[in-house]
C-alpha cells in the first residue's frame, strides 16, 4: 500500500465511528437533497406552464429516471461494496479492476438503454402510466433524458465508487454541480427560450453530462485511490457476477421504485390528471425527506464495508446503532415539518384546489409512515455493504415491491383513491417489521470480537 492508501485505511478504521459517519454522511445527504431538489424544481417549473397534464408528465418520466438510476446504482453500489471491503483488507489493485469494469460496462449499457427506449418511446410512455393527454408532454421530456442516459448511468457508478472509497466530499462536488446547473437551466430553457417542458428535459440532460465530466475528471487527475482505465477492465464472469449480485439490492430498490411509480400513475389515472399530478408531487416531496435518511445511510456504508473487511466488527455494530438513531431523529424532524406545512408545500408545485385536496391526505399519511423507514434502510445498507447479497436483495424488494404492489392493487379496488394514498404508508410499516428480523439475524452471526 502507498502512503495515501495507508492514510485512508487508518482514517476509515480508527476515526471514532460517530464522527466518521457524520463526516461521510453530511456530503452524501447534501448530494441527495440537492439531487432531489432539482427533481422538485423541474416539477415546480413545469407546474408554471399551467397544465395538470404537463405536471403529470414529470411524474410519469420519474419512472424512466428510476430505471436509469437502478442500473447505475446496481453497478455503482455493487462494485462499491466490494471495493470498500477490498480496500479494508489492503487489496487496492483489485479494487481498481472492479471499478474500471463496472464503469465501462455501465457506460455501454446506458447507451443500449438509450437506443432501445428511443425506438419504443411511445409505448414506453404509456407503460410508465401516461394518459392520452399527458403523453405529448411526457415524450418531449423523455427524449432529452434518454439522450443523456449513458452519462446518467455511469455518473451514478463514479459517484458511488468515490463514496465507498471514503471520498464523499469529492462525490458531492460532481453531483451538486450538475444539479445546480439544472435548476438554473430550467427557467432559461423553458421560459427564456420558450421551449416549454422540452426545456426542462434539456436542462436535466446537460446537467447529467456536466456531473459525468466532473466525476470522471476526479479519477483521471489522481484525486482518488481507485484508478479507472480501459487496461484494468476484466470481463470475467466471476467479477461481473460479484458486481451484479452485490448491487442487486440497489437494482431492486430503484427498479421496483420505477414499477411502483407505474402502478401508482396507472391507478391514479382513473381519477384524472389531477390525481396523477397530486401523487407525482407527493412522491417528489416524500423522496426529498427520504433522501435525508438515505444520505446518512450511504455515509454509513463505506464505514461498515471498510471495517468489515478489516475485521473490526465492534465498529460495524457501533456504526449501525449510531446511524439508525441519527437518521431516525433527522427524518422525524423533517417529517413533522412537512406534515404541518403539507398544503402550502403542494401548492408550490401546482396551485390547483383539486390537486392540493388529493395530495394533502396522501402526504400526511406518508409523513407518519416515514418514521418506520430509517431502520429498514440502515438494515438493508448494512447487509449490502458486508456482502450479504441474498438477505440485502430480499429486504430491498419489500417497500416498493413485495408489500407495495399487492397493497396498491387490493386497496385501490377496496377503497378507491383513498386506498391508493394508503398503499405506500402500509408498505413502509410492514418493511420495518421484516427488517427487525433481518437485523437480528445479521448481528447474531457477526463475530463478537475483532480479529
Image (cartoon, rainbow, N blue to C red):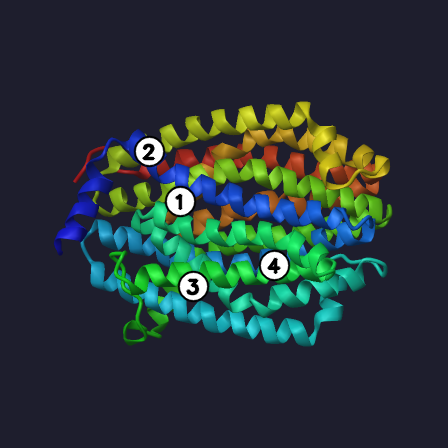
C-alpha span from label 3 to label 4: 16 Å
Question: Is 435 on the left-hand or right-hand side of 53?
Answer: left
Mark 4 secondary-structure assignment? helix
Q: Earlier in the sequence, mark 3 or mark 2?
A: 3
Dot in front, 1 or 3: 3
C-alpha span from label 4 to label 1: 36 Å
The residue to which callout 1 is attached is 383
**Quadrant of the rendered image containing residue 225:** bottom left
- Graded by Cα atoms within 10 Å as few (under 14), some (14 to 19) or many (20 or more), the crowding at tag 4 reads many
Kindly give the residue lying farthest to the front in the view shown: 192
- Graded by Cα atoms within 10 Å as few (under 14), some (14 to 19) or many (20 or more), the crowding at tag 2 reads many
The residue to which callout 2 is attached is 319
Labelled disc at residue 213: 3
Q: Position of residue 38 (x, y in %)?
A: 59, 47
Q: Residue at x 59, y 58 (%)?
A: 204
The residue to which callout 4 is attached is 203
Q: Are marks 3 and 2 in contact (CB under 8 Å)?
A: no
Q: Position of residue 1 (x, y in %)?
A: 13, 56
Q: Earlier in the sequence, mark 1 or mark 3?
A: 3
Mark 3 secondary-structure assignment? helix
Amino acid at each position: 500500500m502507498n502512503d495515501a492508501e495507508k492514510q485512508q485505511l487508518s482514517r476509515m478504521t480508527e476515526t471514532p465511528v460517530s464522527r466518521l459517519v457524520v463526516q461521510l454522511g453530511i456530503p452524501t445527504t447534501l448530494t441527495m437533497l440537492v439531487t432531489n431538489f432539482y427533481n422538485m424544481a423541474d416539477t415546480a417549473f413545469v407546474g408554471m406552464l399551467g397544465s395538470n397534464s404537463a405536471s403529470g408528465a414529470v411524474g410519469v418520466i420519474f419512472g424512466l429516471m428510476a430505471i436509469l438510476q437502478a442500473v447505475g446504482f446496481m453497478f455503482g453500489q455493487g462494485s462499491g461494496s466490494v471495493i470498500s471491503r477490498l480496500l479494508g483488507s489492503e487489496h487496492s489493485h483489485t479494487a481498481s479492476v472492479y471499478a474500471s469494469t463496472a464503469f465501462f460496462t455501465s457506460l455501454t449499457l446506458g447507451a443500449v438503454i438509450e437506443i432501445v427506449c428511443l425506438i419504443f418511446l411511445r409505448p414506453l410512455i404509456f407503460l410508465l402510466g401516461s394518459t392520452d393527454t399527458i403523453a405529448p408532454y411526457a415524450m418531449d421530456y423523455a427524449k432529452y433524458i434518454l439522450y443523456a442516459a449513458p452519462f446518467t448511468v455511469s455518473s451514478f457508478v463514479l459517484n458511488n465508487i468515490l463514496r465507498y472509497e471514503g471520498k464523499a466530499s469529492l462525490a458531492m462536488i460532481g453531483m451538486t454541480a450538475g444539479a445546480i446547473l439544472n435548476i438554473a437551466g430550467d427557467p432559461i430553457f423553458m421560459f427564456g427560450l420558450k421551449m416549454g417542458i422540452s426545456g426542462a428535459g434539456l436542462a436535466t440532460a446537460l446537467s447529467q453530462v456536466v456531473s459525468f465530466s466532473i466525476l470522471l475528471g476526479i479519477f483521471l487527475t489522481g484525486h482518488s485511490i481507485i484508478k479507472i482505465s480501459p487496461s484494468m477492465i476484466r470481463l470475467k464472469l466471476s467479477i461481473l457476477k460479484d458486481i451484479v449480485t452485490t448491487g442487486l439490492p440497489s437494482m431492486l430498490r430503484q427498479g421496483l421504485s420505477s414499477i411502483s411509480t407505474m402502478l401508482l400513475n396507472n391507478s391514479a389515472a382513473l381519477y384524472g390528471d389531477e390525481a396523477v399530478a397530486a401523487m407525482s408531487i407527493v412522491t417528489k416531496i416524500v423522496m426529498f425527506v427520504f433522501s435525508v435518511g438515505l444520505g446518512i445511510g450511504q455515509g454509513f456504508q463505506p464505514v461498515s464495508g471498510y471495517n468489515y473487511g478489516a475485521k473490526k466488527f465492534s465498529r460495524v455494530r457501533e456504526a449501525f446503532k449510531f446511524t439508525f438513531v441519527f437518521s431516525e431523529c433527522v427524518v422525524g424532524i423533517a417529517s413533522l415539518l412537512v406534515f404541518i406545512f403539507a398544503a402550502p408545500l403542494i401548492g408550490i408545485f401546482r396551485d390547483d384546489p383539486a390537486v392540493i385536496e388529493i395530495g394533502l391526505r396522501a402526504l400526511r399519511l406518508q409523513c407518519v409512515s416515514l418514521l418506520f423507514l430509517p431502520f429498514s434502510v440502515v438494515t438493508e445498507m448494512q447487509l449490502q455493504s458486508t456482502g450479504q447479497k441474498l438477505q440485502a436483495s430480499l429486504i430491498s424488494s419489500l417497500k416498493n415491491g413485495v408489500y407495495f404492489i399487492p397493497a396498491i392493487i387490493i386497496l385501490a379496488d377496496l377503497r378507491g383513491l383513498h386506498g391508493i394514498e394508503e398503499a405506500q404508508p402500509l408498505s413502509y410499516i410492514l418493511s420495518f417489521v421484516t427488517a427487525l428480523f433481518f437485523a437480528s439475524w445479521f448481528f447474531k452471526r457477526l463475530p463478537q470480537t475483532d480479529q
